[in-house]
């Protein structure tokens, strides 16, 4: 049998995922939790993440995904937990799929009301169904205006066996140190509270609400309300401007690694890689690592982006130099005499926060995780 060495691999630490979920509960002790596992659990594996979250010691009330396809796939592997469909349904057919699979759809646009009333009128009374009415308080992506949200809520409330949640989404909660953004967040919360009060008066019933995703959970306790929807914080990264997941006490879940495949010595003045974007300002020992943008490592990463080299004497932090290629990057090994071919290199994760790497690449950790390609071998640990 041919022995093929691993060239790039990601290890997913499910125990870290569970610990980050416990952090959500510590921040929001009274809210129901719907962990967000859209986009293949932010690149971490939807099936594995769902199973780990359900099995954790922290109680969750449901799971959230973005698309109908994701919701259907999740229902095939998770028969019990409620599933929240964040992007809602486009037509009657998708709505019927949601109802048949007990998927809780977000209602965010007026074109959905006709489909709702038609399909619900056809339904034989039976299992309860649940919809989330999305009120646009300032994000201006999805969501109904105040009058529409109120009308939708009160009309759907009259349908038998129908449970409703009023929801919105924070636009600027990731930077609490900006007075402008803080004011914007407080205004959004006020808008939601006002509509909630009006609906309570009109319906003479309590109205459950949801507003906080990761940033709201971490920085805006007044937004926690009845439900929270943690996303990137579950995976150990920060939604907050200027802070890393490590600084927030979160644990990395994905660790991306590769290995050194060559080492060479260059003279001052020699260049490295496509476009000769890095010219050695001194005699330089450099190494080539078997990972590139074909594996999901960001091509936008600049000279100086941090990496960790695992040598025989321990882990050493160094930097990327030269342009990212499809299959390779080059790193500075000057002064790291113990580095050898086949040494492991950590691109992000354990010991190197993905938020720091993302900052150097001009992006966010969410994108790093989601762009890891199938060429990377993935394994899971507890």
Image (spheres, rainbow, N blue to C red):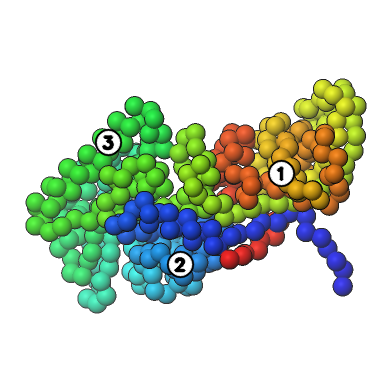
* Percent x, y of residue 139: 35, 39
Judge from the rendering whether residue 189 lies leftward or rightward of residue 322; answer left or right: left
Judge from the rendering whether residue 285 lies leftward or rightward of residue 30; answer left or right: right
Dot 3: few (<14), some (14–19), or many (≥20) neighbours within 10 Å?
some
Q: Is residue 302 visible?
A: yes
* Percent x, y of residue 284: 85, 30
User: What kind of element bears circle 3?
Assistant: helix
* Percent x, y of residue 161: 21, 70
Which quadrant would the N terminus be assigned to in this image? bottom right
User: What kind of element bears circle 1?
Assistant: strand
Which residue appears at 86% of the width and 34% of the height?
285
Q: Which residue is mark 2?
A: 56
- Sooner in the amino-acid sequence: mark 2 or mark 1: 2
Which residue appears at 59% of the width and 44% of the height?
354
Image position of 210 with respect to 361: above or below = below
Quadrant in the rendering for residue 175 = top left
| Closer to the camera in the image, 245 or 369 | 245
Which residue appears at 67% of the width and 51% of the height?
256
* Percent x, y of residue 348: 64, 46
Q: Which residue is mark 3?
A: 186
| Closer to the camera in the image, 369 or 282 | 282
User: What kind of element bears circle 2?
Assistant: loop
Which quadrant would the C terminus be assigned to in this image? bottom right
Image position of 156 with respect to 219: above or below = below
Judge from the rendering whether residue 116 lies leftward or rightward of residue 324; answer left or right: left
**Which is more foreground, mark 3 or mark 1?**
1
Dot 2: few (<14), some (14–19), or many (≥20) neighbours within 10 Å?
some
Q: Is residue 143 visible?
A: no
CA gap between label 2 and label 1 equals 31 Å
Which residue appears at 44% of the width and 64% of the height?
71
Q: Which residue is mark 1?
A: 308
Dot 1: few (<14), some (14–19), or many (≥20) neighbours within 10 Å?
many
């Amino acid at each position: 049998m041919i022995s093929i060495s691993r060239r790039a691999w990601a290890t997913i630490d499910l125990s870290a995922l569970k610990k980050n979920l416990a952090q959500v509960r510590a921040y929001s002790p009274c809210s129901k939790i719907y962990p967000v596992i859209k986009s293949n659990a932010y690149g971490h594996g939807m099936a594995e993440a769902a199973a780990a979250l359900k099995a954790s010691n922290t109680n969750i009330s449901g799971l959230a995904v973005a698309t109908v396809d994701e919701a259907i796939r999740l229902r095939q592997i998770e028969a019990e937990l409620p599933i929240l469909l964040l992007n809602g349904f486009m037509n009657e057919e998708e709505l019927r799929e949601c109802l048949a699979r007990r998927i809780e759809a977000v209602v965010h646009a007026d074109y959905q009301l006709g489909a709702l009333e038609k399909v619900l009128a056809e339904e034989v009374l039976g299992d309860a169904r649940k919809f989330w009415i999305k009120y646009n308080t300032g994000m201006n992506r999805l969501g109904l205006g105040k009058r529409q949200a109120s009308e939708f809520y009160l009309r759907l409330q009259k349908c038998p066996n129908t449970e409703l949640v009023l929801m919105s989404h924070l636009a600027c909660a990731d930077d609490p140190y900006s007075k402008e953004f803080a004011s914007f967040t407080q205004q959004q919360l006020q808008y939601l509270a006002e509509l909630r009060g009006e609906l309570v008066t009109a319906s003479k019933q309590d109205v459950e609400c949801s507003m906080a995703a990761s940033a709201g959970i971490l920085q805006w306790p007044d937004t926690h309300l009845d439900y929270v929807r943690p996303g990137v914080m579950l995976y150990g990264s920060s939604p907050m401007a200027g802070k890393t997941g490590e600084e927030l006490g979160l644990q990395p879940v994905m660790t991306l690694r590769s290995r050194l495949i060559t080492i060479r010595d260059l003279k001052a003045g020699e260049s490295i890689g496509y476009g000769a974007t890095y010219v050695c300002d001194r005699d330089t020992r450099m190494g080539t690592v078997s990972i590139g943008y074909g594996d999901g490592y960001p091509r936008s990463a600049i000279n100086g982006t941090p990496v960790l080299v695992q040598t025989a004497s321990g882990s050493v932090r160094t930097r990327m130099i030269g342009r990212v290629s499809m299959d390779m990057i080059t790193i500075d090994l000057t002064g790291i005499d113990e580095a050898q071919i086949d040494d492991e290199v950590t691109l992000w994760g354990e010991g190197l926060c993905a938020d720091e790497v993302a900052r150097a690449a001009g992006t966010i950790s969410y994108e790093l995780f989601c762009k890891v390609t199938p060429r990377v071998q993935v394994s899971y640990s507890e």
